[in-house]
Amino acid sequence: MLTIWGRLNSHNVKKVAWFAEELGMAYRRIDTGGQFGMDAAYLEKNPNALIPTIEDEGLVLWESNAILRYLAARHGGERWWPADPASRAIGDRWMDWQAGYADAQRNAFVHCIRKPEAERDQTAISASTAACAKLLAVPERYLGERPWLSGDAFGIGDIPMGAYIHTWFNLPIERPAFPHLEKWYARLRERPGYASQVMIPLT
């Protein structure tokens, strides 16, 4: 059975738990990080002191997008890990692109959700929101031409940004209109694994 260490209110843990649901894998998730802490046994597995970490068939692996690629290649077959490099790369590029977006969204998330109202820095929130909006114009344009970041069908390329777009649309901020992103988000919300693993209260 797949084991996932990490608390579910982490974007990076959401990715992995959601994809395990998409794959129909049996798994257990062990709350780790944040208020749950990290014991010596966990730090032996992941000396970066970050989440998530998985163990699958004897393999211990960290870095969420590497985990997604591994699970797709090991357990997903052609549906999730196309043999054709070009087909695979169409979605794969968005997994790397998401890392830059995560940096842009961090201050808006931390100040709106994880800091008490009296400690929130509105200047940092506004700058973060503007940086996100500038970046989101890129997938907005792409999704105007095809339904999924992975191309014509939902794939692992949709998962990293899928975890973050839920936060974007639920932060208490003013957002510009992104109609194609909104439609993509609506399609994501129809997926049971997304609803159960990603669409949880922001904390």
Image: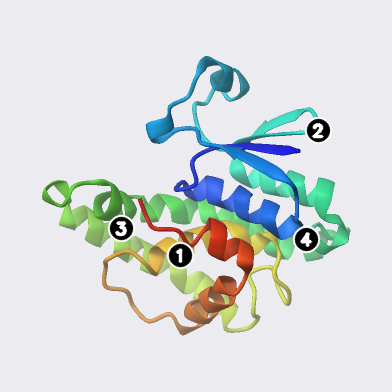
Residue for badge 2: 57
Camera-side residue: 123 or 3? 3
Vertical relation: 143 (above or below) 160: below
The amino acid on which the numbered mark 2 sits, given as a three-letter code, is Glu
Vertical relation: 143 (above or below) 16: below
Residue for badge 4: 88
The amino acid on which the numbered mark 3 sits, given as a three-letter code, is Ser
Residue for badge 1: 166
Q: CA distance from mark 4 to mark 1?
A: 24 Å
Q: CA distance from mark 3 to mark 4?
A: 31 Å
Q: Secondary structure at mark 2?
A: loop
Camera-side residue: 96 or 106? 106
Question: In the image, 75: left or right of 106?
Answer: right
Return the x and y of residue 33 as percentages of the image width and height: 45, 32
| Mark positioned earlier in the residue sequence (3 or 4) | 4
| The quarter of the displayed image where residue 22 is located | bottom right
Image coloring type: rainbow
The amino acid on which the numbered mark 1 sits, given as a three-letter code, is His
